[in-house]
Amino acid sequence: MKFPEIQSLSAIASLINAEYVGDADFEVHGMNEIHVVTPGDIVFVDHPKYYDKALNSAATVILINKEVDCPAGKALLISDDPFRDFNKLTNHFKPFQSSNASIAESAKIGEGTIIQPNTFVGNHVVIGKNCLIHANVTIYDYTVIGDNCMIHSGTILGADAFYYKKRPEGFDQLISGGRVVIEDNVGIGALCTIDKGVTGDTTIGAGTKIDNQVHVGHDTVIGKKCLIASQTGIAGCVVIEDEVTLWGQVGTTSGITIGSKAVILGQTGVTKSVEGGKTYFGTPIQESRETLKQMANIKKIPEILQKLK
C-alpha cells in the first residue's frame, strides 16, 4: 500500500509515538507485508525469530519492538507493539469510509456494464466495460474489475483478511488496507468470497473462471486462464500460476506456489508447493499416479494377510 504522498520518517514516528533510528527526513513511500515489500516501504516485525528476515528484506523502514543494528541505507521505528502501530498507520492512511448509496458516487462504471438490483458498489471501485454484475453482489471499496467480467449473485469481493494476533484478552485483527483486482474476461460464480490484501492486492488473472462457493484468501495471486471448481478453499498468500485447474473441494495451505498447468484433482489437500505440468491427488499431496498405486496396494492387504495365514 503506497501513501498518497511521500512521508518523512519523523512524521511517521510522530503518528505512532515511536522512537526512530535514521535521518528525520528519510523518505517513506508506503507500508507492506514482508512478501510484497519494495524499497521505501515499512514492514513490521515483533518476534526475534523474524528480525533478520525483516531487516534484510526489500523494505527500507523496519517497525520493530527492539532497537537493533540498523542496516546501511535503512531506518528503524522502535515500538513496544509493532502490530498495533501497523494498524494505526493503516487506519490513518486508508480509513474506513461509510456509504449511504447502493453505488458510491466515487465508483467508476464502464460503458455497457449492467449492475442488477441490490448490488452494493463501494467507494473508489472501478468496473470496466461490458461487465454483468448479478443481483446481491457486494463489492467493497477500492476493488478493481476489468472488462467483460461476469459476477454471479451473492459473491463478495474485498472482505477483510483472516489475519489475527493472539493476545491474553483475545484475538486482535490486522486491519486490511489492500484491494481485490479482477482482470479482464474473468467469470466468478455465485456465493464466492475473495478477500482483499492486507496491504497489497488479491489478484484474479485474465480469463480465469471460478465456480460457485469458492473462497480466495488475502494477497493470493491467481494467474491467467485458470479453472477453479466449487467448494475450493484457497488460503492467503498463495501463488497459482497460469492455466492451473483446481477441481472441487481442493484446499490449500498458505504461502505456497502451484506451478503453471498443474491439475489438482478433487478433495486434494495442497500441503506444499508443487511443480507445473503434472496432475496431483491426495492429502498430503503427491502425483496422482503414485497416490492411485498406493490405494490399489492398500486394497491388496486383506488378500496378503489371508495368504500369510
Image (tube, helix red, strand yellow):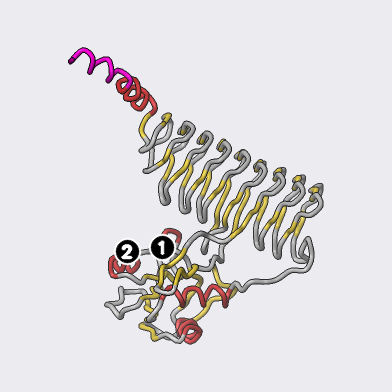
Question: In this view, which residue lies farthest toward the left?
Answer: 308
Circle 1 crowding by C-alpha within 10 Å: few under 14, some 14–19, many from 20: some
Q: The disc labelled 2 sits on which kind of residue?
A: Lys
Q: Is residue 305 magenta?
A: yes
Question: Distance of mark 2 from mark 1, alpha carbons?
Answer: 8 Å
Q: The disc labelled 1 sits on which kind of residue?
A: Ile
The residue under label 2 is: 53
**In front of the other: 119 or 34:** 119
Quarter holding residue 20: bottom left
Give residue 70's position: percent from left, percent from top: 30, 76
Q: Are marks 2 and 1 in contact (CB under 8 Å)?
A: yes
Give residue 33's position: percent from left, percent from top: 45, 64
Residues in magenta, as a range:
299-309
Q: Compared with residue 231, is residue 7 higher up or lower down, i.e. above or below?
A: below
Secondary structure of residue under mark 1 = helix
Quadrant in the picture for the C terminus: top left
Q: Earlier in the sequence, mark 2 or mark 1?
A: 1
